[in-house]
Image (cartoon, grey):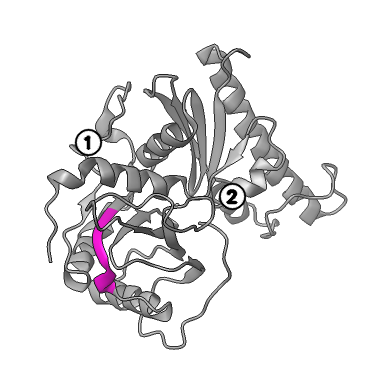
Amino acid sequence: MGGSGGTSKLASRPHRGLALLRVSCKNLHNAMLLALDVGNTNTSLGLYKLDVNKPGSPAIGAGRAGDNPELAAHWRVTTHRAQTVDEYGVFFVNLFEMHGMAPSQVTDIIVASVVPPIDSTLRQVCEAYFHIEPIFVEPGIKTGMKLLIDNPTELGADRLCDCIAAYERYGGPCIVVNFGTATKFEVISARGEYLGGAIAPGLGLSADALFSRAARLYRVDIKRPAKVIGTNTVAHLQSGLYFGYIGLVDGIIERILEETGAGPENPPRIIASGGLARLIAADSRYIQEIDDMLTLDGLRILFERNRSAHPRAR
């Protein structure tokens, strides 16, 4: 559920759960929004500068991280469901201090989680270590988007964030493909309505199933092979996984385009996000944009739309 940045190691690690994968940081204001995108495999954290003159509204053009002028810093870590409140809290504090920040700089928190078992833990972390009552993306939150599906409460928080950010940043119609533990396809109309989507097993999950069930096949690095026709077992596996998955992605997008009647006069923007977006988008016939910060930016937009109704705790 990251942008550019190098791998960083903590000199001292009292925590033993979350593994730091990537970090990017810029100069920070004193008032910040912490956005947490908690996925089954990874958790993304983003710090947005807030306009102190307009509480709850991030400052436009107040600095850059990646392509988003409002994002001050972001990290990508591994999600571990067995973490305790203190293990999460100590990790967050160390992460902040390692980059010259303090938890007291955070004035608001919003969380999108698709891992219900750790929601209560994260809520306690926010209250104990940041002294803030977080906003969770859950039924009842103001979205500003009409959800034309059978049961809107079933839509995952991360998927909702992707849809809102995609329409806000790229307009409609648009299609979002998020490559995570599962690969999610989202379809948004020209009027900003969520029409529905599809879910497929993620590339990593598909590979794990193959390796675990086929006794004579061993794990390989998932990457683009030099050619489709491999001459050894490693190349065979890489070809099937890589080109096969691109076929899945492009095949679903193609059927979505046919089903929605998309024409050349108003073609949808097709945006990819998630950990494997850059790998797959390189050979996709349809993906036009890669937006690493889509889910975090959706969280920031949802915060703006709900801040006035949410009292801050300190």
Question: Is 36 positioned to the left or the right of 206 in the image?
Answer: left
The residue where tag 1 is placed is 142
Where residue 251 appears, as percent x and y from the top left, is 63, 27
Q: Quadrant of residue 194?
A: top left
Q: Nearer the viewer, mark 1 or mark 2?
A: 1
Going by the image, does 205 lie left or right of 61?
A: right
Which percent across, then down, holds residue 18? 41, 71
Front in this rendered view, residue 241 or 7: 7
Q: Position of residue 89 (x, y in %)?
A: 28, 74
Which amino acid type is marked by label 2?
Leu
Label drawn at residue 276 = 2
- Residue 6 - label: none
Q: Amino acid at mark 1?
A: Lys
Q: Would you identify the image quadrant in which residue 139 lies?
A: top left
Region of the chain picked out in magenta, as a range? 103-110
Query: Crowding near pointer 2: few (<14 within 10 Å), some, many (20+)?
Result: some
Nearest to N terminus: mark 1 or mark 2: 1
